[in-house]
Amino acid sequence: MPKKQLTDSLALDDAAPSPGLAGWQATGLALAAAAMAARAGLGTLVGAVLLAPIVYALVRLRRHAPGARSTAELVGSTLGPRGAAFAGVLQVTGYVLLAVTAAQFIGQVFVPQQATTDPLSPIELNHWLWSLWAVAAIVVAAMLVFALPGRVVASLAAVLALVGLLIQFYYALAVAARAMTGTVTEQIVSHDPPPTLGVLGTLTVLAVSLFGVEVVTTRTRRGSSNGWPMSLAVGVVALIAAVTWWAAQQSGWGGNSLNGSTFGIAVGELYGDTGATVVTVGAAMFIFAALLALLWGIAAVTEGLDAKASPDTVFAGLVVAMVVLAVAVIQADWTPGYVGGLVLLALYAVVLVANSGIAADSVVTWWLRFVMPVVLAAVVLLPLLSAEFSLGALEPVFVAAVLVAAAAATALLGTRSRPD
């Protein structure tokens, strides 16, 4: 089948190969992409609820277009080539920002930290050394994605994610069990309960950290909807995040926190440096797995676009952009993960619009059409309301809005209508 003319700079390439994944590989890849939410605590449970209708919409689109081989093609089955291009650009943008966030964490693991008497005080790091390790993580992951077959990369990400999450789950149970025996008797950390609006705002911010699980739909084998892999991955990560949060609360370090960010401190206090090191290594494993999964998704999306440059050239350019962005955000003490989550939220809105283009009269379908837009708007607005529209809260939303607008402009200018 001949390719379309290169004047369609972002049109889907019908001739692009799309080798699929086995069921366990797809589940492991989805698990890896969602693993960064393993310490988001109760926010992960909220994220799981938010993602449920998105997974349903993707499965329904797959049934509507069984020949679609990517997320963009699923969207394009009802919204046309420009909708497909818009979805593809949003997906790549969101994954790039999340991948940089993953690299930031991995780099932080290898940078020596200055001793401090207060374990809850801000960590002081050599930012240039931190940048070097983050760049190394991106380069290594990109080389693996570029050099190895897609199935091998997916298998590697699955194994790393599973081992890392199991380490965290084991220590979470150990911390909770030890606390319940009465070994931990002192509440080391306590905070006043936040107001209701503050709780809702915090939960929605944490929920965004689970976004990205749809990475498995960027390259889908025929006959698979990827519904079970995505659902199972979300359920496993939500369970581990909830147990981790509960363990931190039982240990006395959690206070009234809604996430499991103090889990590592609790492990260090109860099991010493060895336990803390093992948990940190486990976290680095599933975060690197997330980085691999996201880069795998970026490579898959670029393969499905008929751009003027080759997919390898586009992928290399995106890796260079990630390297530059990683250095910039580390030097600025900023994390782009929340912005990436908001960009993916826009992708989910596009998926829901595409799903609404399929004729149906079921209650679930009408619920998706009328309720989900309000829910998605609430995800954006609740953190702003809880922060009283402060500059710090507005900044990521503004950046995300600019990126979404740029994606829309790229899709509009880079594609042309084609007759059916």
Image (cartoon, rainbow, N blue to C red):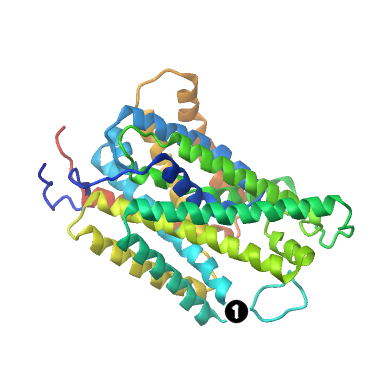
Determine the image quadrant of residue 221: top left
In terms of depth relative to the viewer, which is nearer, 333 or 147? 147
Circle 1 crowding by C-alpha within 10 Å: few under 14, some 14–19, many from 20: few
The secondary structure type at the circle numbered 1 is loop
Work out whether 301 lies above or below 111: above
**Which residue lies under the disc numbered 1?**
125
Relative horizontal placement of residue 213, taking residue 321 as reference (left or right): right
Determine the image quadrant of residue 260: bottom right
Q: Position of residue 81 (x, y in %)?
A: 24, 41
Q: Position of residue 228 (x, y in %)?
A: 47, 35
In terms of depth relative to the viewer, which is nearer, 21 or 420? 21
Q: Position of residue 237 (x, y in %)?
A: 58, 46
* Quarter in which the C terminus is drawn: top left
Relative horizontal placement of residue 321, taking residue 260 as reference (left or right): left
Total marks placed: 1
Q: What's the residue type where badge 1 is placed?
A: Leu
Residue 398 seen in the current view:
no
Work out whether 220 lies above or below 183: above
Q: Residue at x 27, y 45 (%)?
A: 18
Work out whether 388 lies above or below 57: below
Q: Residue at x 33, y 64 (%)?
A: 318
Residue 295 seen in the current view:
yes
Relative horizontal placement of residue 306, taking residue 378 as reference (left or right): left
